Image: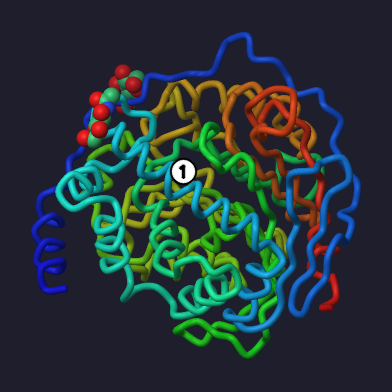
Amino acid sequence: MKFLLLWLFFVASAWCGVLASECNGKPDADAQPNMNPINKAAPKLVASIKNGKLYKVPGNSVLNVLHVWGTPYEMGYAHGTLLKKEASMFMNQVWDYLEEQVIEAINGSVKWNFRDWFLRDVANLGVEAACDLEVLATAKYSGPYFLEEIKGLADATGLDYKKILRIHMLGELTKGSCSMFGAWGSMLPYDGVLQLRSLDWNMDGPFKNYPQITVYHPTSDQTDANGMKAQAFVNVGWTAWIGSITGVSSAKLAISEIGVSFPDATFGKESRFGVPFTYILRDILQFDYTLDDAVNRIANAHRTCDLILGVGDGKENRGFRGVQYSAGVSNFFDDQNMKPSNESWHPKIKDAVYFGMDWLCPGYNVVLAQQLQKYHGKLTAEIAIRDVVSIIQSGSTHIAIYDLTHDLMYVSFSKSDSESGPKAAYDRQFIQLDTDALFAVSSP
Ligand SMILES: *[C@@H]1O[C@H](CO)[C@@H](O)[C@H](O)[C@H]1NC(C)=O
Ligand SMILES: *[C@@H]1O[C@H](CO)[C@@H](O)[C@H](O)[C@H]1NC(C)=O
């Protein structure tokens, strides 16, 4: 323990390196619109136990729609009981995959964008100890309810509690390049808020085979450290994954997230000591009621790595903020003060905030801006699916489009091993889910 802590302080002062360049990727100029009809079938109940119900969407055999009720432990236990086999397979496969990818990254044939300090820790200590260091660095800043839920999952599945916990550090250890927009007012043909979350992360590992939408119905006596009351929310991710990267709450708050590999100097230094971003995003969904609550939570957090976040609030059309997020800064953007400021590749658009793949990433931002300008005043979820995500080619792993005004969410996932068709989520059939109906599902 002492050794670990000493080591932690040593590496924390040594690992950070700032990249001075910009990303050079861009979408294919021949990218085609996504013409698949949207699957609007309502989820069908396939299993029910104490504190849990499992649904499948007709026409999609892979996606699980899981509802859980109760205390954090009870929700984890119900999750692990209904999906015992899948949870065990997925967690074990993710761990093996992580070890394999890390070794390849250290050997030089990099597939995953791991953080440099993590690779250094692994080289010196092994994968388990490197993940444990991360657990230590973030433990103090993580709500106890995360650990209770993981305990419930471990008890129901027989999985090693520590293994589940280590895997939940993944967000801090790797970087996904993703895209987002928030659009309101004059951007839309109706009065409201529309938001995109595209995740470009991994299509080769086990993730593609375990997509899951988990609908949490926490007991109302649960609160966070500041006494904010828990509410129902939808978490889009994978089986046995309890952090949030994508989701929407019953308060009509939705989240978007981009990992930054090409920051500018305004981000400052990254830190390892703080709340994992997948936990703060979940806290927003679980506890925050307004956009202001989320802004305060982010501003006051012990933040760690460089990210761009997005939070939308569909209540009375309160709007959307993009967030420049790092250990040192949290800057909140609307359409007037959006950064980075560069009219040639990141032009300001009235009533929209957007980011394509990264902070300094002209190639993707130019095309995203073009598509948003083209549909200014006409943008809907259907158009975003047909003519935005497919043309900017962002959202390979999964996509959520939140129509916060009409309580609808549209999701797509990368091709699993048992499916046919194109690989990337942005080229595949989207599923429409009525979030009001999800929150109204009654406990078993
Ligand atoms: C990568 O490193 C591992 C562990 O040191 C070694 O066993 C393996 O052969 C290496 N692979 C390549 C392709 O160099
Ligand atoms: C805008 O971006 C381009 C391309 O990265 C760069 O050459 C130019 O200097 C930037 N302009 C400003 C005002 O920052």
CB of residue at label 1: within 8 Å of ligand 2? no
Judge left or right: residue 69 versus residue 2. right
- How was the colour assigned to the protein in this rendering? rainbow
Image height check: is 397 above or below 282?
A: above
Residue 202 appearing in the image: yes
Amino acid beneath label 1? Ile
Identified at 55% across, 41% down, the residue is 206
* Displayed quadrant of residue 436: bottom right
Q: Is residue 110 above or below residue 273?
A: above
Q: From the viewer's perspective, tell me whether residue 207 is left or right of residue 377.
A: left
Q: Position of residue 28 (x, y in %)?
A: 56, 13
Ligand 1's image quarter is top left
Identify which residue, 85 or 363, lies in the foreground.
85
Residue under the image location 49 percent in, 24 percent down? 364
Q: Percent x, y for residue 100? A: 37, 38
Q: Is residue 70 left or right of residue 12?
A: right
Q: Is residue 23 above or below residue 139?
A: above
Residue behind mark 1: 258
| Residue that appears at 29% across and 37% down | 103
Residue positioned 55% across, 85% down in the render:
223
Secondary structure of the residue carrying tag 1 is strand
Query: In the image as oriented, which residue stretches furthest toward the bottom?
Result: 221
Foreground pick, 269 / 266: 269
- In what quadrant of the picture does the N terminus appear? bottom left
Quadrant in which the C terminus appears: bottom right
Q: Residues within 10 Å of mark 1 (few under 14, many from 20)?
A: many
Residue 393, percent across and down?
A: 59, 24
